[in-house]
Image: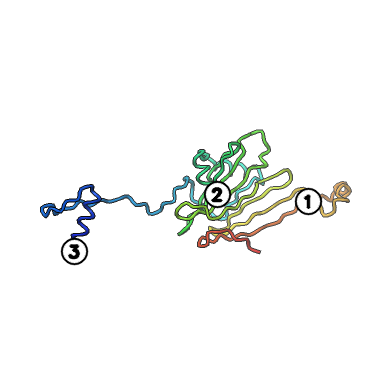
Amino acid sequence: MKHKAILFACLSSLVLGSCSFSESKKNVQKIDFPVKEDVLELVDCMELKKFPSVFSYASEKLKHDLISKGVKPLSKEEKTRCLEITNTDFHIFPINKITYEKATLIIYLVKEINDESFHEMDQLVLVIYDKEGKTMNVLSRNLQDNFSTREFEFTSSIAFNIVDTDSEYSPDPESEAEDIKNGREPEPSVSTTYYQIDPVKMKFEEIN
């Protein structure tokens, strides 16, 4: 134990920049190097704690609620670091995050900058990062196009579904005009895909 104590004192002296073997120097200064408990350096956003939570353009209210969460877009450097996106036609907003023991899920809104656009390219992007900030899995979907919308509904911290609504659906396109004339307008086609988040494997898994 005595030999180990002498070795430790010498190594500590080397860290300080001066190695003195003088017996008169009994007190060796201890250096506390800053160590981050969590080295994940991502942009800041609010923790998602309320379930169910819906992210969608399916109605004007839902669209307003989602866009209002996008307070501050990522800088050019943050775009590259967090999503590897350099396209200048889009703002990228971190909306919410879910923190797990070994991973972090961040929900981004990717929004066209051009306000005159129909915003068909606006997307919701889900990214799972490990503790070192490495991208492990990505899932993205457009929020709307000319005839359809998508709703992301988080039912818990590890489960969500995507609801696709196609307003142009018709069970019989050849008789659609006659159906409308007779007051039998076709109902929109709605399909739902269910996903599970595995925070250990750090991936999104579609549930059949």
Is residue 59 in sight in this rendering? yes
Upstream in sequence: badge 3 or badge 2:
3
Q: How crowded is mark 2: few (under 14 residues within 10 Å), some or many (20 or more)?
A: many
Helix, strand or loop for disc 3: helix
Question: Residue 122's quadrant in the figure?
Answer: top right
**Label disc, if present, on residue 42 of the rendered structure:** none
Say few, some or many: other residues with alpha carbon within 10 Å of mark 3 (under 14 / 14 to 19 / 20 or more). Answer: few
Q: Position of residue 142 (x, y in %)?
A: 65, 47
Residue placed under numbered mark 2 in the picture: 107
**Cβ–Cβ below 8 Å for labels 2 and 1?**
no
Q: Position of residue 198 (x, y in %)?
A: 54, 61
Residue 49 in sight in this render? no
What secondary structure is marked by label 2? strand
Amino acid type of the residue tagged 1 in the rendering: Tyr
Q: Locate residue 138, reporting x and y percent.
A: 57, 53
Q: Which amino acid does label 2 sit on?
A: Ile
Give residue 169's mark: 1
| Lower sequence index among marks 1 and 3 | 3
Taking depth in this image into account, of 86 and 58 the one nearest to the observer is 86
The residue where tag 3 is placed is 3
